Amino acid sequence: MASEVVIGHDGIVDHFLGDAVMAFFNVPIKHEDHIARAIAAALEIQMALPRLDARLAGAEGLRVGVGIHTGLAFVGTLGSTSPKDYTAVGDAVNIAARLQGQAAPGEVLVTDTAYEAVRAAFPHAQRQVYEVKGIPDPIVAYVLT
């Protein structure tokens, strides 16, 4: 379900890791509104969860927290001659992953850098500051619910 939503917003599903999905936007096709596309995908996934829970009658409901950041990353094929992996690496990826780890179920956390591009659409987003492992400076993020 999440992969179809990401692809529907012109994102790339990089990989699945446990219950996490890593996706990136703006490559290989550039979109001026790539941040808005990532946020729209995240919110659509959040909205689809109750319908998915209903189909999983009796199962514990799925809860998703999302972290979104924008910045420079190396995107390309990494690895040896075999295997190879088309992926994104760099601080931008690490910050998004750490932010996702801070997101409560139902939250979409967007770094201040990404929030600037969508501030008008979410004027009442709550500002938070997070200290996270491996990132020297605190991460300023906004909660979109």
Image (tube, rainbow, N blue to C red):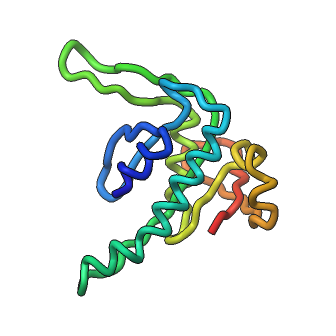
Q: Quadrant of residue 56?
A: bottom left
Which residue does the image show at 57% across and 34% down from the upper left?
91
Q: How many numbered tags mark residues here?
A: 0
Query: Is 74 on the left-hand or right-hand side of 138?
Result: left
Is there any visible trace of residue 138 in the rendered image?
no
Question: Is the residue 122 above or below the residue 10 in the image?
Answer: below
Which residue does the image show at 50% across and 58% down from the upper left?
101
Residue 80, horizontal then vertical, whole percent? 25, 15
Query: Is 58 on the left-hand or right-hand side of 6?
Result: left
Task: Tell me the quadrant of the picture where the N terminus can be found.
Answer: bottom left
Question: Is the residue 94 above or below the residue 63 in the image?
Answer: above
Outermost residue on the top side: it is 81
Task: Tell me the quadrant of the picture where the C terminus can be found.
Answer: bottom right
Which residue does the image show at 59% across and 52% down from the upper left?
39
Question: Is the residue 109 above or below the residue 111 in the image?
Answer: below
Outermost residue on the front side: it is 8
Outermost residue on the left side: it is 82
Q: Nearer the viewer, residue 75 or 101?
A: 75
Residue 111, horizontal then vertical, whole percent? 68, 49
Residue 127, horizontal then vertical, whole percent? 76, 62
Is there any visible trace of residue 75 in the rendered image?
yes
Which residue does the image show at 62% across and 58% down from the upper left?
109
Residue 13, horizontal then vertical, whole percent? 38, 41
Question: Is the residue 88 above or below the residue 130 in the image?
Answer: above
Q: Nearer the viewer, residue 98 or 4?
A: 4
